[in-house]
Amino acid sequence: MLKILLNKLGITDRPSLAQFIKQFIKFGIVGLSNTFVSLAVYYVLVYFGAYYILANIVAFAVSVCNAYFWNSRYVFNKQSNNLKPFIKTVLSYGSTALLGTALLFVMVDLLHISKWIAPFISLCFTIPLNFLLNKFWAFHTPSKDNKCRTSE
C-alpha cells in the first residue's frame, strides 16, 4: 500500500524520496514565512480598525503574491513568463482563502471565538489543503511516463 502511494507521488527510489522530502521542507519554510506575512497584514489592519473580513481579504492578496514568488523560484523551480501557474496559484489560495474566511466568520460571529485566535485555528485546515493544491495542481508538470513532477 505504501509503495503504491509512493509511486503515485513519483517516488521510486532513494534519490526521488530525498528530493520529495527536500521539496516538502522548502514548501514548509515558504508556507511558514507566508503565514507570518499574512498574519502580520491581518493583525496590522485589524489593529488600525479594519473589519476583520476585509483585513483577511487584503492579507490574502499580499500573501498569495508572496507565495507564488517563493514557490515558483525556491520550492518548485518553475520560473516562467507563463501566467498559467500564477492563475492556478491564485485559484488555489483563493479557494483556501474562501474556506478560511468562512471559518473565520463561523468562529468569530457564531462561535464567539476571539478574532485574534480564530486565524490560527483556520490555518490548521487551510495550510494542508494549500500544499496539496500547489503540489499537485498549480505547479504540477506531468512527465513523459505520467508521473507527477514538480521540480526539475
Image (spheres, helix red, strand yellow):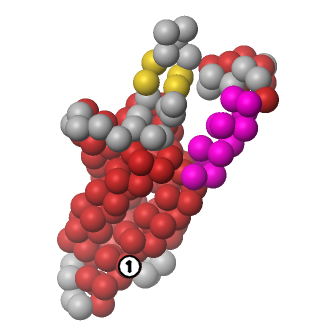
SS assignment at label 1:
helix
Mark 1 neighbour class, 10 Å CA radius: few under 14, some 14 to 19, many 20 or more: few
Q: Answer whether residue 110 is visible to the viewer in this image.
A: no
Q: Quadrant of residue 54?
A: bottom left
The residue pinned by badge 1 equals 40
Q: Which residue is drawn at 38% across and 79% down?
A: 40
Say which residue appears at 29% left-offset and 37% top-offset.
80
Left or right of 148? Residue 73 is: left
The residues colored magenta run: 15-26
Asked if residue 23 is among those painted magenta in the image, a careful observer would answer yes
Q: Which of 48 and 32 is in front in this view?
A: 32
Is residue 107 shown above or below 94? below
Is 58 drawn above or below residue 19 in the view shown? below
x, y percentage for residue 151? 51, 34
Residue most toward the top? Answer: 145
Left/right placement of residue 130 relative to residue 56 reads right
Picture quadrant where residue 23 is located: top right
Q: Nearer the viewer, residue 115 or 41?
A: 41
Say whether residue 29 is visible. yes
User: Is 31 left, or right, of 64 in this rendering?
Assistant: right
Q: Where is residue 62 in the image (x, y as percent from the top left)?
A: 27, 65
User: Where does the N terminus fall, quadrant-wise?
Assistant: top right
Q: Is residue 49 left or right of residue 104?
A: left
Asked if residue 123 lies in the magenta stretch, the reply is no
Q: What residue type is labelled 1?
A: Ala
Secondary structure character of the magenta stretch overall: helix
Q: What's the residue at 23%, 68% (across, down)?
A: 58
Q: Compared to 76, does 107 lie above or below?
A: below
The image position of residue 65, as x and y in percent, is 29, 57
